[in-house]
Image: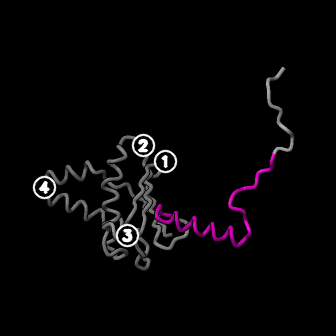
Amino acid sequence: MKAFTLPLRLPGINEYQNACRRHPIQGAVMKKKWMQAVMVYLTPVAKLSWPAQFEIIYTEPNKKRDIDNITGFGSKVILDAFVKAGFLPDDGPSYVNKIDSSVVYGDTPQIEIFVKEEGDTLWADISDIDKLFDEATRWAEENNMPDRPVLQQNTKPVKKGRKK
């Protein structure tokens, strides 16, 4: 897993849409400017193995902006920066299969990015559940574990009938 911390507060999707409405070039310039700002904080790493999964945590100083406003433009700029920097060939579904975004509130605005690559053992996709179950079953068989827990039977006889 790779981690990056960006001491930035990216504009929201509303600001980006307003720039695009004023003039398409303004929107493109804004996106390019913020992509370059993100790339400054991406430490040089080898290309990521894919499909990669991103967890992005935005720290905001207050609750004035909507979560979708914060994460919409941020996710787009961050993934495009990873592509532009050469870490990923593309940000399509073949290369990025999951993006988790969350917003927390604190004094210092920042963005934390955690990239989990194919092969990271700490990240289990839903498609890996069968494989994990098979590994657990194989381990149980190798260690002579029963299929189910053995329950102790009640040794006291049960009296049937009405209580007096």
Q: Which mark, by number, is residue 159? A: none
Query: Alpha-carbon distance for marks 2 and 1?
Result: 8 Å
Q: In the image, what residue type sits under mark 3? A: Val
Residue where numbered disc 2 is placed: 62
Residue 87 percent coordinates (x, y): 37, 75
**Mark linked to residue 23:** 4
Residue range in magenta is 124-153
- Residue wearing tag 1: 106
- Residue 154: give x, y in percent of width and height: 82, 44
**Which tag, 1 or 4, sits closer to the chain's start?**
4
Comes first in the chain, label 4 or label 3: 4
Task: Identify the residue at image location x=32%, y=53%.
Answer: 72
Sequence-wise first label, 2 or 1: 2
The Cα atoms of the two marked residues, 1 and 3, are separated by: 23 Å
Instruction: Determine the secondary structure under disc 4.
Output: loop
Farthest residue in the bottom direction?
A: 46
Q: Element type at marker 3? A: helix
* Three-letter amino acid code of the residue under disc 4: His
Q: CA distance from mark 3 to mark 2?
A: 25 Å
Q: Is residue 140 magenta?
A: yes
Count neighbours of disc 4 (C-alpha within 10 A) and say few if under 14, some if 14 to 19, many if 20 or more: few
Tell me which residue sits at (69%, 57%) in the image.
Answer: 148
Q: 155 left or right of 19?
A: right
| Residue at (52, 71) in percent of width and height | 120
Q: How far apart in space, not on screen, are marks 4 and 3 (Cα)?
A: 27 Å
The picture quadrant where one finds residue 113 is bottom left
Reading the chain from its start, which is encountered first: label 3 or label 2? 3
